Amino acid sequence: MPKAGSGLSLDGDRIPMWLVLELTYRCPLHCAWCNNPLDFDNYRNELSTEEWKRVLREARAMGSLQLGFSGGEPLLREDLEELVGEADGLGFYTNLITSGIGLSRERLQVLKAKGLKQIQLSLQSSDRAITDSLVGAKAFDAKLAAAREIKRHGFPMVLNVPICRQNIEQTEEILKLAEEIGVDYLEFANIQYYNWALLNRSEFLPTREQIAMAEAAVARTRARLGKKMTIYFVIPDYFDERPKACMNGWGAIHLTIAPDGSALPCQEARVIPGLEFPSVRDAPLAWIWHESPVFNEFRGDSWMKEPCRSCPEKEQDFGGCRCQAYLLTGNAANTDPVCAKSPQHHLVVDAVAEAVAPGRRHRPIVMRRRDSINTAFMGCGG
Amino acid sequence: MTENSTVAAGDVPQLNPLYLLRWEEPQQAHVMLYPEGVVKLNETAAAILLLCDGQRTAADIVADLNSRYTDADVSAGVYRFLETSHAKGWIRIKS
């Protein structure tokens, strides 16, 4: 999933500069916008410590530089500290992407000693009740305590706030809270609609008016704080006329390894049927990255159809997101329908209109839980 | 931005502590690493930033580089780069 701050100013030279290790899909929270697969519980066959270390060595040898330890909740892996130490020793810039649940003072001390460089903590609201209801657990107090400990240990900190209709109007309060904590980077990441978030799309899409208000609050705070806190505000691509430059292009700089060792061009790529994702258990990472069919499927632009093929902007956005193209149009090689040039752009326009239609019947939000939905129809991932 | 990005001769620039500047062998270049980002530096950019140690003044940095690159006076280029770096938040001016 592209992040506001991940615009690498490197061409990459076909190097997987940005490596994300999804250490586990286990998580104490139940966020209804989770980008983990719907059948996350089928991925219990997690790589061992030694297997993860081998992935780290192989990736570093290929020139990987930025490393995200993600999940699920990576703190549920008891070998996290050991893996951070290994990665730091190899020369990675190590990022921990966490809910903060389980991030004790003791673990922070060890992570610091092992060379962890920065921590990205998620927070859903400045309000306890709203946070706890959005994540389906009593989490607010633990997250706030974690935030303060992170700063006490001197880590650079990104506070990541997934934005939806339920919390977007608290932008002002969230900005104040982040300032008070001493956050270095505040990232308002509008929810992107894949997996769990797509199930709940009509309940989460904000209105244009809400987005404008939030942007105004961000602008006021930027003017007041200057460089003290960097604030990213990514508007949801559904409200845009052009697609995001998803992953800087398929197989260009991003490489994600799922808990079971599957190598993915992006975290969502398994939603596209018919692709075979090789496992680091079965093949060398360099072969997977350079040679495997799946990493070449949408690499470059030879796969493009019209209107992308002849579009002067194809070098800027690479046709948008392959996963979104599949999820909304049924064909991953289509233009991302977020683009106003897409013949299926109405699918996005209609989704926004439906979400804000007056008198619409609201649906219950589906929380990320093993038994929330029937995933028996899905291919087993693990 | 509320801060002024001009850099004077007596200013003491210092790398932003959020940034890690180091040689990256596979890229054969210096890179700056920070949360969720990488900047690959060309040789002169790296030479300037490596001197932003919180000790040297901007004038010291210019003098140092002038002694190494003798073809032309680097002064204008160095100040311009320091100002850009300051605006981007890569360096801070020590007060």
Image: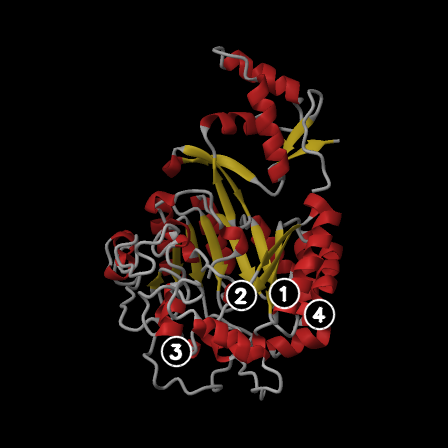
- Asked if both marks, 4 and 1, belong to the same chain, the answer given is yes
| Dots 2, 1 in contact, CB < 8 A | yes
Q: Does residue A204 sit above or below B41 in this rendering? A: below
Disc 1 is placed on an element classified as: helix
Marks 2 and 3, how far apart at CA: 34 Å
Disc 3 is placed on an element classified as: helix
Q: Does residue A26 sit above or below A186 in this rendering? A: below
Residue hosting label 3: A42
Foreground label between 2 and 3: 2
Relative side of A309 to B37, left or right? left
Point out the image quarter for the N terminus of chain B: top right
Q: Return the x and y of residue B82 as percentages of the image width and height.
A: 60, 28
Q: Return the x and y of residue A147 as percentages of the image width and height.
A: 67, 60
Crowd class of label 2 (few under 14; some 14 to 19; many from 20; radius 10 Å): some
- Rendered residue at 47%/71% (across/down): A348
Does the rendering let one see residue A177? yes
